[in-house]
Amino acid sequence: MTTLVARSRRSLGRVLPALLWPALLLAGVVPGLLPRLLAPLAGGEVPDTGSTPLWQLALVHLGFVLSAEAAVVLLGVPLAVAVTRPGREALMRLAEALTGLGQTVPTLAILALAVPTLGLGVKPTMLGLVLYALVPVVSNGVAGLLAVDPALKDAAEGMGMTGRQRLWRVELPLSLPVLLAGLRISTVYNVGTATIGAALGAGGLGLLIINGLSQQNTALVMVGAILSALLALSLDAVLGLFTPPE
Amino acid sequence: MIELQHLEKRYTNPQTGAEFYAVKDLSLSFPSGEITALLGPSGCGKTTTLRMINRLIEPTGGHILIDGQDTRRERPEQLRRRIGYVIQQIGLFPHLTVAQNVATVPDLLGQPKAQTQQRVLELLELVGLEPGRFAQRRPAELSGGQQQRVGVARALAADPPVLLMDEPFGALDPLARDMVQDAFLEIQRRLKKTIVMVTHDIDEALRMADRIALMNAGALAQFGTPDDLVRRPASDFVRQFLGEDARLRQLAGLKAADLMQPGDATGLPQIDGRLNARSALSIMLRERAGAVAVLGEDGQVKGVLSWQALEQAG
């Protein structure tokens, strides 16, 4: 009984934010609502959010983040699997060094380096997002796969599973919580990183922040910042639903 | 029958080029339907030998035949699905239910789901776990003894003729170990599998095994029944490894009720038939008696256990 109660409480603690933050985000993109609320910051003048409606900016922003994450899953998970196969210790150390390096290079530097080759707009933004989000997914994927109890791998092999079967039936399911945690971290990071994309002309919620800064309009900056934060919190809470307890 | 012919596992140190034999020129036959213990000190090559049988380790020389067929003639995965495998760490998959764990090998073999489901229930029953209570639980909810019962059920799921066990009861506390060992012997009496069991526990080997292969430094020190090793040790090593109290340890693995004979029990000290023969001997020494009366579970005298019977036992 007590475990049942504890379990339902725990799930309530996860479901509530997953409802609350998206609801606030939806309220935030209602035309005119947020700018009017923040007008006192601009001396009572309602900030001009431009011709694109807020919900569309938020959707574009979400699109950047989700497509970057999709690419990251397609690249990062196979990479984590590849470097953790037995006999590839050297490759794994190389991957760890590279992901560590990725974490120390500032996003802005990645974006700035990408512009000369890819030009302005969506392309360099996506490159920056993917490279930056790859780091937590690969490092968590590797950590999760390495943490699988060797006795389980021995049992699986001894019962006649092939390498592929061991991976799909044992190693991936068991490392999934750690992998998902990495995906969640990288998604939240990328909501923030994607705002910088607006500086390259990619659009999204960063546009409000950039315009606000150039117009020295705090209210406009705040509209962009608050919506980005709500988007990040919403994604974090929704992804949290998929992370199994403990 | 499993035959090892001049089996060898040689490791070469890549830096120095020095060679080390984990197992050297080992020839041995494990009889069908019997439990053979691979016994020996750590590093003697017993686990290496076991793992070469299902090719988790590939030999560097010699052959292994199972029922006359060389194990190298089929893919390792195919071979392993016909060989049950039980390990000390148990190795149940924590993300799967007990039933799903037991169904692992039948699923790998592509057996029909309905048939496997039925089989899982039978196996849980066989290892003494009520299917209704345990089938849908996760391994983490079970005690160590219950987990290893599931481990045994999982190894038996596809009805393999051969079972390999690597210190299967080594991680259990003494009480649970006794219970699971008893349950396992009971199962083996019915199923008559060909079992190879690695252990460093002399008591376990004397108690469980029909035959013992005692290994030392990668080679066979002696192969025989527990009685052979205890009463007719082939070398000083065998004698020293088993110890001077080997006979007492052997008696500890026998039940008083199994050794009793019909006879006149009047005036004899009475003992519970479930006691082991070593305890019975202790009582005979304490009571200064040449024999004891053995009681059944109903408290009635079932027979007499005499000093002579203890001498002969084994």
Image (spheres, coloured by chain):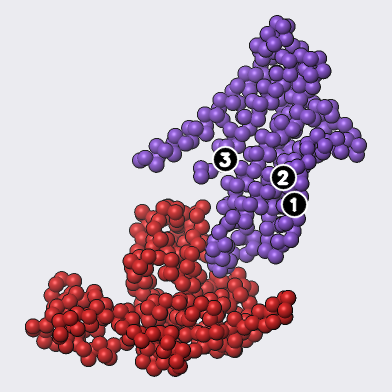
Q: Residue at x 45, y 77 (%)?
A: B200
Report the front residue among A143 and B133.
A143
Report x, y in % for residue A57.
74, 23
Find disc 3 in the rendering and name its residue. A242
Q: Residue B314 placed where, x, y %?
A: 32, 87
Q: Nearer the viewer, mark 2 or mark 3?
A: 2
Mark 1, residue position: A97
- The circle on residue A135 is 2
Q: Residues within 10 Å of mark 3 (few under 14, many from 20)?
A: few
Chain designation of label 3: A
Which callout, 3 or 1, points to the residue nearer the camera?
Answer: 1
Q: Residue flagged by tag 1: what amino acid is it?
A: Ala
Vertical placement of residue A21 versus B123, above or below: above
Residue at 55% across, 84% down: B217
Cα distance in 3D space between marks 3 and 1: 29 Å
- Amino acid on which the number 3 mark rests in the picture: Phe
Tell me whether circle 2 and circle 3 mark residues in contact (CB < 8 Å): no
Tell me which label, 2 or 1, sits earlier in the chain.
Answer: 1
Q: Residue at x 72, y 14 (%)?
A: A219
Q: Colour of chain B?
A: red
Q: Measure the alpha-carbon separation of dots 2 and 3.
A: 21 Å
Identify by letter the chain in purple. Answer: A
| B163 or A80: nearer the viewer | A80
Residue A53: x %, y % from top left: 74, 18
Using the rendered image of the protein, determine whether residue B279 is visible from the camera's viewpoint: yes
Q: Position of residue B21 (x, y in %)?
A: 62, 83
Determine the image quadrant of residue B307.
bottom left
Res. B236 image quadrant: bottom left
Residue at the location (52% across, 32% down)?
A15
Q: Is residue A101 above or below residue B167?
A: above
